Image (spheres, grey):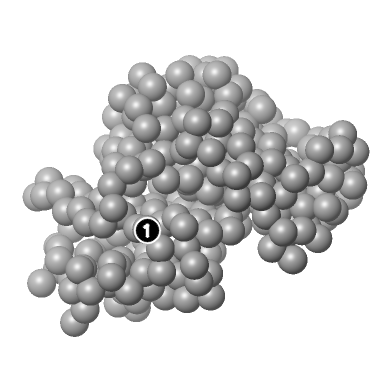
Amino acid sequence: MVTVQEAIANVPGEVQFVAKHMESLQEFSGGASGIYPPASTFKVPILAELYRQVDDGIIDTQRRVELTDADRSPGSGVLKEMANGLRLSIHDLAMLMIIISDNTATDILYNLIGRERLNDTMRDLGLTETKLPMSCREMLYSMFGVSTNDISLGNAQVTTRLARQEILPNAAGFSEDLGNVSSPSDMMRLLEVIYTGGMHSSKSRDEMMNILDHQQQNTIIPADLPLGTIVAHKTGGVPSVRCDVGIVFSPSGPYIVSIMSKHVTDMKVIDRRLAAVSRAVYDHFNP
């Protein structure tokens, strides 16, 4: 059995995890505390704010949105490859945003809910280390030095530069002052709000949990856990950054775990190393 300390020492970069058992309320943490780029885990705050607005009667998840060229965002996902005119429900977009990390779906929802309202809600929840001023497109354009107004060209440039790892490490997208930032503690607290229904109706809480439970990218938190363990979670990654945050349904009861890493020097092994951290947390709560 690998200890938490050993697992953290094997991570090629800075890492922190924060965990909380939802029955015993025991908290467990380790690694380097501080601010981390959330990468695509920032889609969990978008999900939470989306369903807050659903409960307030502002948004109807069955409303359909028609895909246009102006919506397409680079990076992960499938909607950027789909033909114009495709009509998706808000619920469909939320599902795609979480389970395959679709950036086009994310940016449609980000613009729908409004960045100011998103950040106001994070502040109202006391998540003072979470600031999300950038959409996926804005973040990736910044990280890869793309400045064109031609969306098709800009997305193609991101794809090319991503393949070549031609990143700008000092870009605003990586900045703690200008880019998206959060912390393992903030993400753990937000997942606690979602899990306990602290900000949402029971219907919205159940829909969010169902979406998170259908995650298809399972190379970190669930990867080394016993076969059949249910994990409702969201991964995230950009060059030198890898994260996963979620709720694990273990034999001793459910627990929340938030794992974030930055300044990663070996992206080929990072998922396996973070999976070992996840397993050590599981073993701590299930001795």
| Above or below 268: residue 86 | above
| Residue 257 makes an appearance in the image | no
Q: Quadrant of residue 60?
A: top right
Question: Which residue appears at 20% of the width and 53% of the height?
Answer: 29
Taking 124 as reference, is 54 left or right?
right
Amino acid type, mark 1: Glu
Question: Which residue appears at 35% of the width and 27% of the height?
Answer: 128
Question: Which residue appears at 48% of the width and 45% of the height?
Answer: 37
Between 164 and 255, the residue placed more toward the observer is 164
Q: Position of residue 74 (x, y in %)?
A: 75, 50
Between 286 and 6, the residue placed more toward the observer is 6
Q: Secondary structure at mark 1?
A: strand
Q: How many marks?
A: 1
Question: Which residue appears at 41% of the width and 69% of the height?
Answer: 12
Q: Position of residue 223 (x, y in %)?
A: 40, 73
Q: Position of residue 125 (x, y in %)?
A: 33, 24
Q: Position of residue 59 (x, y in %)?
A: 59, 23
Q: Quadrant of the C terminus?
A: bottom left
Residue on which the image places disc 1: 14
